[in-house]
Amino acid sequence: MTACPFCDVAVAEQPLRNGLAFAIYDRFPVAPGHTLIIPDRHVASYFEITADERLALWSLVEEAKLWIDREFRPDGYNIGINVGAAAGQTVPHLHIHLIPRYAGDMNDPRGGVRGVIPDRQKY
């Protein structure tokens, strides 16, 4: 197995953290301010985390949102978690995508996260 890109993130690269999780900018952002919220413990699936880890992650989502609001002033957000290869997960360490959205960043954003299956996005 190759090294996990999230297990070795230096504390200096973590602008936000709490006792069980941290946040970093996505290295391949889809929008300015795209942030990842990651548990300290190496765990692949959202469905494998503890209740305390769940609280820590969602607390950082809220904190990161305020931080992104100040720094980037987005018009909206998408929040997503890929669980398993069939859902597009490529790094086997749980991470929550907090993706700022900006008016005009795509022609028709209706359907939001439903776009993971493009033919089903519009309804």
Image (cartoon, rainbow, N blue to C red):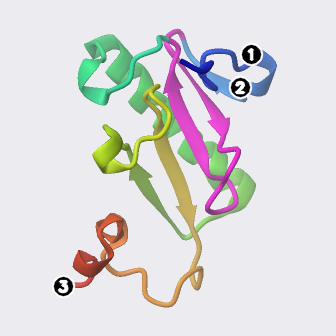
Residue placed most toward the observer, 14 or 70: 14
Residue placed most toward the observer, 94 or 70: 94
Q: Position of residue 41 (x, y in %)?
A: 47, 11
Which badge, 2 or 3, comes first in the chain's sequence?
2
**Type of residue at label 2?**
Gln
Q: Which residues are magenta?
A: 19-40
Q: Is residue 23 above or below residue 90?
A: above
- Asked which secondary structure carries label 2, the reply is loop
What is the spatial separation of the Cα atoms under label 2 and label 3, in whole angstroms?
Answer: 39 Å
Residue at mark 1: 11
Residue at mark 2: 14
Which residue is at a point 71% across and 25% down the rendered structure image?
14
- Asked which secondary structure carries label 3, the reply is loop
Q: Position of residue 54 (x, y in %)?
A: 33, 22
**Residue lying furthest front:** 1
The mark closer to the camera, 2 or 3, is 3
Is residue 15 shown left or right of residue 23?
Answer: right
Could you classify mark 1 by the number of other residues whose Cα lies within 10 Å: few (under 14), some (14-19), or many (20 or more)?
Answer: few
Which residue is at a point 71% across and 59% down the rendered structure image?
72
Could you classify mark 2 by the number of other residues whose Cα lies within 10 Å: few (under 14), some (14-19), or many (20 or more)?
Answer: some
Q: Is residue 23 above or below residue 119?
A: above
